[in-house]
């Protein structure tokens, strides 16, 4: 049976991206994926039966995608459906997990691993073990807020105690949690440390990518969180070498928003496109560790790029989100450059170029930067020092998530884009070169 033009996704994984599990689809090359995504981070973090810190969609098989290819994912639309959410900085609770509070939660009293839970009341002690009734939440807020959004989903305000408690008592309603989601709504905690704070919405996908070639907890499908799995005491432990099987789908890069294109590696047959962890807004770095997790409706278009053997994602942000030095040159700028070149007897030697952002991840921001530089150099067939020079004078290093997700953005010569079959994508995104 051939691939479908559109796949509707409303199923979710148990927190682990497992290439051995069945995928949805197939969707045809050039087809669409429409998903109702669940909130990421805090809800799954206080739901111990989820084994990965997030609750992402069941992966979709893309027709024609083979290992060693890449899949270009165009983000056609992102629509927030939550009325309210809650978030804040976290602190793990000792005695309630085995090595990693995102992955391996255990009840502190009956010691059940990955216990089912029930909600009793509101507040930070409301999540209880279904077996023995113990407070089983592996995380607590250190400073946190409940935020609600206007009907147009353009602004949000943080609520006082009365408003936070109203939201907490009907958490799934206010968060518009999808029917098949099992997460506990984080608004149950009713936090209200910041009251009356006004924020703008600019939604994006914190998780968007392809399935790794070995089972990896979803929030750990990146070089920073993934490093917690190396030598871990639980069943999802990896070696440093095995961590290379990740696909870095957990980016938390706020430029992965409507209108952007994310090019992802294919490490399993069909690619296995998945998404989740929509955020209503986030400054660079996600410095609090978490932001406003929301439910939403997302439409993607996928297309296969044969033989583009990349190890991590490449991002084509919308023009507005490009660093100043990486913006494509205007006709006027190029005319000035040609006049300058003529003065130096360099007619017709000015590069034509368009921007790419290479995602790098690692345990620290320095490691992530090195990873991004190396990925760019390998793909383009140039030295790391050349990439460093280009990123310095025609681009920028930007922080996606602290402690270890960055983008290396710079203007890439069009002749290199042509070799990689990326020129048409870049031209569609940024326009023809004047």
Image (cartoon, grey):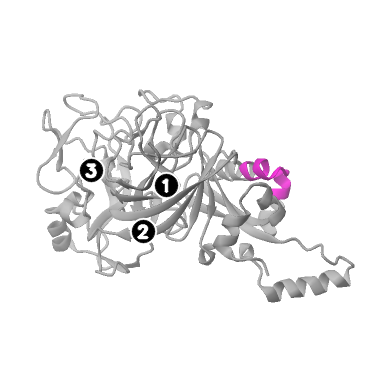
Residue position for label 3:
181
Query: Taking the image as drawn, is residue 25 in sight?
Result: yes
Q: Give the range drawn in magenta.
A: 375-387
Residue 212, image quadrant? top left
Circle 1 is placed at which residue position? 208
Residue 13 in magenta stretch: no
Q: Earlier in the sequence, mark 1 or mark 3?
A: 3
Residue wearing tag 2: 78
Q: How far apart are marks 1 and 3 (CA)?
A: 18 Å
In percent of width and height, residue 384 lies at 70, 44
Would residue 265 appear left or right of 374 to someone viewing this image? left
At x 24%, y 41%, the residue is 46
Query: Which percent across, then down, holds residue 58?
Result: 33, 39
Which of the two residues, 51 or 263, is positioned nearer the viewer here? 263
Question: Disc 2 to disc 3, how far (Cα)?
Answer: 19 Å
Q: Is mark 1 on a helix, strand or loop?
A: strand
Looking at the rendered structure, the secondary structure element under dot 3 is: loop
Q: Is residue 173 above or below residue 199?
A: above
């Amino acid at each position: 049976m051939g691939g479908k033009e559109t796949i509707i996704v409303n199923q979710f994984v148990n927190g682990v991206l497992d290439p051995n599990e069945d995928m949805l689809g197939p969707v045809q090359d050039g087809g669409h994926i429409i998903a109702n995504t669940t909130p990421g981070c805090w809800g799954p973090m206080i739901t111990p039966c989820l084994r990965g810190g997030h609750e992402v969609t069941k992966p979709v098989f893309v027709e024609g995608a083979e290992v060693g290819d890449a899949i270009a994912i165009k983000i056609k639309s992102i629509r927030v459906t939550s009325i309210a959410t809650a978030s804040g900085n976290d602190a793990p609770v000792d005695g309630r997990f085995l090595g990693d509070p995102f992955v391996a939660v255990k009840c502190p009293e009956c010691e059940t691993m990955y216990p089912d839970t029930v909600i009793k009341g509101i507040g930070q002690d409301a999540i209880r073990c279904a077996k023995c009734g113990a407070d089983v939440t592996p995380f607590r807020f250190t400073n946190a807020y409940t935020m609600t959004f206007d009907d147009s989903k353009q602004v949000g305000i943080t609520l006082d105690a009365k408003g936070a408690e109203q939201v907490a008592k009907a958490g799934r309603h206010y968060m518009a949690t999808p029917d098949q989601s099992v997460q506990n709504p984080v608004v149950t905690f009713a936090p209200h440390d910041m009251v009356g704070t006004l924020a703008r919405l600019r939604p994006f996908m914190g998780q968007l990518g392809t399935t790794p070639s070995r089972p990896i907890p979803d929030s750990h499908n990146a070089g920073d969180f993934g490093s917690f799995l190396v030598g871990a005491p639980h069943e999802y432990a990896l070696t440093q070498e095995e961590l290379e099987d990740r696909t870095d789908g957990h980016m938390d890069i706020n430029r992965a928003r409507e209108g952007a294109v994310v090019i992802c590696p294919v490490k399993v047959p069909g690619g296995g496109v998945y998404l989740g962890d929509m955020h209503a807004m986030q400054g660079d770095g996600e410095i609090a560790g978490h932001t406003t997790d929301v439910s939403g409706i997302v439409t993607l278009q996928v297309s296969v790029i044969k033989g583009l053997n990349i190890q991590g994602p490449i991002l084509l942000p919308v023009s507005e989100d490009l660093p100043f030095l990486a913006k494509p040159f205007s006709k006027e700028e190029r005319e000035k450059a040609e006049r300058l070149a003529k003065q130096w007897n360099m007619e017709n030697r000015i590069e034509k170029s368009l921007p790419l952002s290479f995602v790098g991840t690692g345990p620290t921001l320095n490691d992530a930067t090195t990873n991004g530089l190396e990925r760019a150099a390998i793909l383009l067939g140039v030295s790391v020092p050349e990439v460093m020079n280009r990123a310095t004078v025609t681009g920028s290093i930007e922080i996606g998530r602290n402690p270890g997700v960055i983008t290396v953005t710079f203007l890439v010569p069009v002749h290199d884009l042509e070799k990689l079959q990326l020129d048409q994508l870049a031209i569609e995104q940024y326009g023809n070169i004047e």
